[in-house]
Amino acid sequence: MDRLNTLLTQVLNRRGLQGQATASLAVYQAQDWLNRTLPAFASDLKASQLKDGILLIEAGNSIAAQECQQQLSLLKDYLQKECGLTHIEGVQLLRDRS
């Protein structure tokens, strides 16, 4: 009997949704990591999307952006090693203008 993750991967590939599912997982894992690593800025940092191998993180203020900037390489390493998301080429921090 096939394992659930094998079946899920096969179905997602068949439907052409594997890339979207992987991107969603990366955003979810990144947000969780940010909340655990920088709890004081959890409401100011938002992992928004993974596009073309670049994870985008929006910062609500400049202090949150500065603190997050120092952790970006650790976040990328975490996503690649711990989560198995090897297609992440980089992490980009954006200052939210809203």
Image: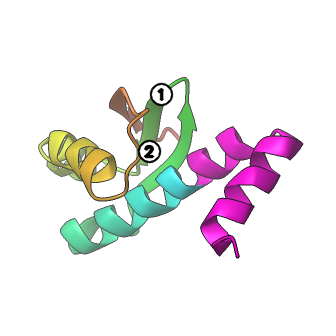
* Mark 2 crowd level (few <14, some 14–19, many ≥20, 10 Å Cα): many
| Start-end of magenta stretch | 1-24
Query: Which residue is identified by label 2?
Result: 58
Decide if residue 85 is on the left or right side of residue 79.
right
* Mark 1 crowd level (few <14, some 14–19, many ≥20, 10 Å Cα): some
Identify residue type, mark 1: Gly
Q: Image quadrant of residue 11?
A: bottom right
Quadrant (top left/top right/bottom left/bottom right) for the C terminus? top right
Residue 97 among magenta residues? no
Name the residue located 58 percent from the left edge and 45 percent from the top edge: 23
**Which of pointers 1 and 2 lies earlier in the amino acid sequence?**
1
**Percent coordinates x, y for residue 5 in the rendering:** 62, 66
Decide if residue 91 is on the left or right side of residue 15.
left
Identify residue type, mark 2: Glu
Could you tell me if residue 38 is visible in this image? Answer: no
- Position above or below: 7 against 81: below
**Percent coordinates x, y for residue 68 in the rendering:** 22, 48
Q: Nearer the viewer, mark 1 or mark 2?
A: 1
The residue lying toward the viewer, choosing from 29 and 69, is 29
